[in-house]
Image: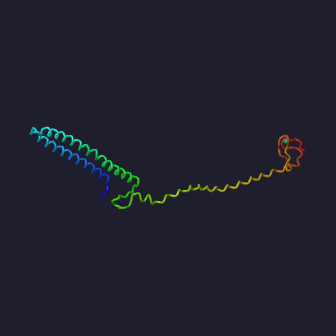
Amino acid sequence: MFTNIGNKIRTLAKVLCIIGIVLAALSGLIMMISGISMLGYSYTAGAGVALIFGGIVSAALGALLAWVGSFVLYGYGQLIHSVQQIEKKVLGDEYQDFDKQPGVSPFSGMNNAAPAAPVAPVAPVQPIQPAQPEQPAAPEQPAQPEQSDVKVCPKCNCANAPTATFCVGCGNRLD
Ligand SMILES: [Zn+2]
């Protein structure tokens, strides 16, 4: 019954405006007609003329007043209509018409809702560092052949037996 009350008020404003204009026009017309009828008699002719002009003025003024007066009512209806549109947009699916849920404000859900506790920023979980692979043990240096095992010729770098007296490569004397 009261759904879309904003539109109903706007319609009411239009209807009242039209009724006001019609009534003003009718009363003005009656004044003019009676004024015209008074023109026939010389002793009422002056009053008749005044009545005709009065009728025209009152019709115009009455229509103007009805029109201007409806502004307020129309504006009120427009305001309610706009607020309802905003409500529907803001609430979306939660929007409930007063007519369907008497006594329940569409905002009750919002008002009763406990204010959302500020969510403490969760410290980012430190990714577990993959275990550093064990540094491979330095490869054992291959055992250098004992210098005493060979006699390297200082002249040609040839390896000679430790007991050799002369180099097998160049014949140089080894000490
Ligand atoms: Zn040699």
User: Is residue 173 rendered to the left or right of residue 64?
Assistant: right
Taking the spot 22% from the left edge, 41% from the top edge, the residue there is 60
Q: Looking at this view, is 78 or 129 the one in front?
A: 78
Q: Quadrant of ligand 1?
A: top right
Q: Looking at this view, is 70 or 162 the one in front?
A: 70
Q: Looking at this view, is 165 or 2 the one in front?
A: 2
| Colour mapping used in the image | rainbow
Q: Quadrant of the N terminus?
A: bottom left
Taking the spot 39% from the left edge, 55% from the top edge, the residue there is 92
Percent x, y of residue 168: 85, 44
Q: Quadrant of the C terminus?
A: top right
Percent x, y of residue 6: 32, 52
User: Is residue 42 rendered to the left or right of residue 166?
Assistant: left
Q: Is residue 99 above or below residue 41?
A: below
Taking the spot 83% from the left edge, 44% from the top edge, the residue there is 158
Taking the spot 44% from the left edge, 58% from the top edge, the residue there is 111
User: Is residue 161 rendered to the left or right of residue 11?
Assistant: right
Percent x, y of residue 165: 89, 45
Percent x, y of residue 140: 76, 53
Corner quadrant of residue 3 = bottom left
Corner quadrant of residue 36 = top left
| Numbered-mark total | 0
Question: Hey, which residue is sitting farthest front in the picture?
Answer: 43
Corner quadrant of residue 4 = bottom left
Q: Looking at this view, is 139 or 8 the one in front?
A: 8
